[in-house]
Amino acid sequence: MAVERASTMGAPPLHRARAEREAFGRRLRDRVRRVDHDVWVSGERDVIARLRGNEEHRIRELLPYRHGRMAASPFAFLRGGAAIMAPDLAALPHTGYTVQICGDAHVRNLGAYASPEGRIVFDVNDFDETCRAPWEWDVKRLAISIVLVGREAGVSERVAREAVMAMVRSWRETLHELADLPAVELGRYCVHRFAPEGPVGRVLRKAERMTPLQARDELTAPSHDGKPRFVANPPKLSRVPDAEAQAVLGALPAYRDTLAPNHQQVLDCYLAYDVAFKVAGTGSIGGRNYVVLCVGNGIDDPLTLQVKQALPSCYEALGLVAADPRLASHHGKRVAEGQHRLQTWTDPLLGWTSIDDAPFYVRQLSDHKASIDPADLRRSSLIEYARVCGETFAKAHGRTGDAAVLYGYAGQADKLDRAIAVLAGLGADQVTADWEALGRAIERGDFEARDLD
């Protein structure tokens, strides 16, 4: 049964007293006790059928690269398997209290990027699956990813469990803080609970070094007219036929119309002149993903845009949530609006368009962007990073729901922390079993797997 978008009806409005809103959150415990979040699904499940269903409308020639990446490790499988886990999350007990979820929460889907003011910030950075849904789905998927990446880094099960509990505790404590903030301050809250020399600090420094010029030079070479152009590096980067390139360039005026006037003015300073097809990510492989090279104030003022097909959110596609009728007709707009809601600072050139009647969203390909290397998450680094993940998702959920209601449910005690830690271990075991099932299917020849790297 789909989770109704209006399932939070009955919650006191934000202008009511915090105590009243927290009391509503505590009453949600009558629906699901905090200790009862310690379960995972059981029974028969056809993971291969779920994968096939998710790939039904994708470019078939690219799917072996998706399978190859998902087969690399259980964590890699989770990265590509939001649609595989979605029915499991929906089958678990949840309060019914909805927020804007990332939908594909895991430790690699947070990272650093440049704010419109040029400041390097840390936040959620993937929104392909975003929709309005129970907050538990983000928290539980994120917790499972922490255990999986911990196992991959070689930490003990005890440390992985401590990291999950640290994440949930940080989520609770941040909500407690956010519940007292004026709405304007909540709107500009930035993640700050990290050590400069810790894993997040290292990601921020990496992002500072990733300039638009460096990003362009990694994908291009000078051409006969002096302008850099994309260099074919198949299968990762491919030139496209002229007609296809013109279709992409022809979609940019409609994209421009989705930007604010001051950002349109910036975009107008750039000339878009080259297009390529880029295969990247894991879960999104098989959709159409273009990069567009633009030049502004001279040859050393590049802008590289990503024009990415917006496939339906797996939660909506599977009927697990009711789609927002305003956004159901254009998933590029769904992705862009979800990103605006969840992030404190958003790419000023984020917008959407259509190509051949298919929805796309558009953003800067690399504007000081960087994400964590899972190998960097060992012992104390894993626990610190998990705390930052908890703070980040509390900010996202508090902005799009009511921090007082969420904190009222979670409370001061560690009951939720302990329950989610148990669930994370069980869920990580299930993802590992699913990954093994994919490996067997590849060995049987049911799926082709190729190396993209």
Image (cartoon, rainbow, N blue to C red):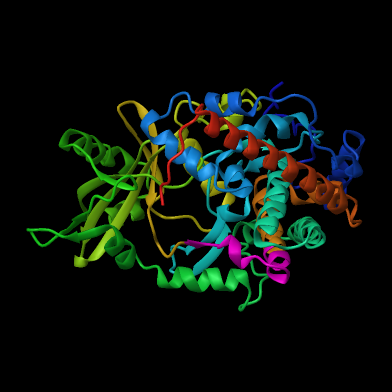
Is residue 84 visible from the viewing direction of this image? yes
Is residue 102 visible from the viewing direction of this image? no
Residue 175: image location, x then y, percent:
76, 56
Residue 217: image location, x then y, percent:
27, 64
Residue 438: image location, x then y, percent:
59, 35
Residue sitting at 68 percent across and 52 percent down?
A: 148
Q: Is residue 312 left or right of residue 197?
A: left
Residue extending furthest toward the left: 224
Q: Which of 232 and 312 is in front in this view?
A: 232
Q: Residue 112: within the magenta?
A: no
Q: Which of 347 and 217 is in front in this view?
A: 217
**With respect to residue 116, does 55 lie above or below?**
above
Residue range corresponding to the magenta coloring: 370-385
Residue extending furthest toward the top: 1
Residue extending furthest toward the front: 444
Q: Residue 376: within the magenta?
A: yes
- Figure quadrant of the N terminus: top right
Q: In this view, does 395 lie to the left or right of 410?
A: left
Residue sitting at 63 percent across and 39 percent down?
A: 435
Residue sitting at 52 percent across and 70 percent down?
A: 204
Q: In this view, does 294 lie to the left or right of 438?
A: left
**With respect to residue 413, does 54 lie above or below?**
above
Residue extending furthest toward the bottom: 197
Which of the 4 quarters of the picture holds residue 202?
bottom right
